[in-house]
Each structure stands twice: as structure tokens, then as C-alpha cells.
Image: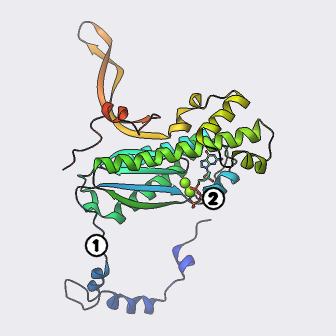
Amino acid sequence: MLRPVSALFGSLSKSKRHCSLPSATGVSGMAKSKYEYVRDFETDDTCLRNCYIVVRLDGRNFHKFAELHNLSKPNDDRALGLMSRSARSVMEELEDIAIAYGQSDEFSFVFKRSTNWFRRRASKLMTHVASQFSSSYVFYWKEYFGEQPLLYPPGFDGRVVLYPSNRNLRDYLSWRQADCHINNLYNTAFWTLVQKGGLSKTQAEERLNGTLSADKNEILFSDFNINYNNESPLHRKGTTLIWEKVDETSTKKITVPKEGEKEITFTRSRRKVTAHYSDIIGDCFWNEHPDILEEDS
Ligand code: DGT
Ligand code: MG
Ligand code: MG
């Protein structure tokens, strides 16, 4: 039920409304109020020039969120798809994001090192990313989960980190992708032992205790005939979003004098956000997309 604002906050009597107005403007007739000085308490959070600005978001308490929404284990393609859709919305709505990388309940957004968006103020950049992402997550929920309801408003924390060199930025992204690999290999082995091997969660944990990557690969291959390298690249590598020129073909009906109606086909190139599920640790991806990184100064 919609309620009038006065019902929510209580209404002011006429006399109170009158006396509250002059004091709110301070000294009458001056261009600035006497309260203006409080602006000076704001801290300067301008990000250092020439650095890439990375904003990383992470789902708040998604362990509980995954349980409550019955997300499939170890990976839920609906949830991963919704994360990517929300990240695409961030890239399309905000300026100067060159690349984004996401896995599990997190997404990192890399602003160009030359960006001057919001005068590089960290709080502005971070809050715009977090709010655009969160509202998109709710807005697009139905596209991925259909009639399954969203049970409560999810939240995402954010942080800003600056990277001064291309090497540092690539190492940051490599770190996140290595994290994706380590977690996904463990989770794949763990849930295969539970779901296909009939082990309890405690037994599966004990079985994997102290194992190296090669051991987990071996368990999957020998006991379950699963070649980990053939598992979905989305799950193994995470999602990388970049801007690319994509050719789009469309048809249009035109009327030509004497000839009548004709259908013409034309192709035009458009900048679009595209998703990649490939390795971003090695050089190959970066050589194929040389425009993402700006030259080190
Ligand atoms: P936080 O970030 O400190 O508020 O706490 P959490 O619970 O979000 O912890 P975090 O971010 O370290 O771990 C992500 C959690 O999200 C983890 O418990 C697994 C869950 N999660 C993410 N994606 C999926 C999925 O596709 N399926 C399932 N079942 N769980 C997922
Ligand atoms: Mg989280
Ligand atoms: Mg996380």
C-alpha cells in the first residue's frame, strides 16, 4: 500500500514549517551559507594518475545466498550468467572500462589508465560500479531464474586497487584466474566425490586433504573418467568481458522508383561487449587483443 510521505515521517505543523526554513539557509542574502565549510571535511580520494583503476565487487555472504536459492554445485550456470549480464550492464552504462573479469560471486572492472571519469575519484567509481551491478542483478534475475523468486535483496562489497604497470595489471588478472582454477578444480573433485562417488562431505574433504592439482586431476580421471580439461571453459577459466568491433548484418525494405519494393542487406561494424572463456594468464589473449592495454609511460 502506498502511503503519503507525511504518514511515513510525520507531518510538521504549519508554524514549525515556517520557522525551520530561514535557519536552514543560514545568513540570508549571502551567496554561500555558513554551513558551507563542512565541505572541507571531505577527503580527497583522487586515484593516482597513469594507473589502471580496478574495482572488484564480491557478493555479500553468497554462501548463504547459494544455499537459499538452491544454486547447483559446484557451478550454477544461471547464477554465472546473471553475474556476466550485470557486468555487461556496468560496462555499457559506465565509461572507460577496458576489460572485466569474473568468477564465482566476484567481478573485477578495469578502468583505462587514462580515464578521467568522475575526476578519478575512487568513491564515485566504486559506488557507481557497485550500484549499477546490484540493480542489474535484480533487474535481470528473471531472465536467468524464470519464475524462481529472488528471496532477498543481494548486496556486493567493493574495493579499489591501483596498478601502475601493464605487468602489475596482468598479474592481478592472472591472480584472479588462478584463484578460479584452484577453487574450481577443488570444488569439481569435491562434488564429484559426493555426488557420483557417494562419499559424505567429511569423507570427500578427507580424501582431498593434502592433494595437489595433479592428484585431483587423477582422481577425476581414474575414478570417474572425467578429463578436467574437457570441463566447461566458463567454469575453469571464468568470464572475461572486452569491447570488440562486431560486424552486424541486417536487412531493410526500400522502395526503388519503377522497380518497387526491394530488400537490401547491409553490414555495419559496431562496438560490443563480448565474452571470452579463455586463458588470460599467457600472452596469447593479449596478443590477440592488443587494444586493451595502454602503453606503459
Ligand atoms: P563474503 O564474500 O565474505 O561476504 O562471503 P561469501 O559467502 O560470499 O564468500 P566468498 O565470496 O568467499 O565465496 C563465494 C561463495 O559463493 C561460496 O560459498 C560459493 C558460492 N557460490 C558462488 N557461485 C556459486 C555457484 O555457481 N554455485 C554454488 N552452489 N555456489 C556458488
Ligand atoms: Mg562473497
Ligand atoms: Mg567471492
Q: Is residue 210 above or below residue 3?
A: above
Q: Ligand 2 is found in which quarter of the picture?
A: bottom right
Instruction: State the image coordinates of residue 197 (x, y, percent, origin top left).
Output: 78, 37
Q: Is residue 40 above or below residue 69?
A: below
Residue 274 in sight from this viewpoint:
yes
Question: Relative to the observer, which residue lies in front, 100 or 192?
Answer: 192
The earlier-in-sequence mark between 2 and 1 is 1
Q: Amino acid at mark 1?
A: Asp
Q: Is residue 95 above or below residue 36?
A: above
> Which residue is rendered at x = 58% and y = 70% of the image?
3
Mark 2 vs mark 1: in front? 1
Q: Mark 2 and mark 1 in contact? Answer it, CB < 8 Å.
A: no
Mark 2 closeness class: few <14, some 14–19, many ≥20 residues within 10 Å: few
> Which residue is rendered at x = 74% and y = 39% of the image?
193
Instruction: State the image coordinates of residue 80 (x, y, percent, origin top left).
Output: 55, 43
Question: Relative to the observer, which residue lies in front, 159 or 123?
Answer: 159
Residue 78 in sight from this viewpoint:
no
Mark 1 C-beta closer than 8 Å to ligand 1: no
Q: Name the residue beneath numbered marker 1.
A: 44
Q: Name the residue beneath numbered marker 2.
A: 152
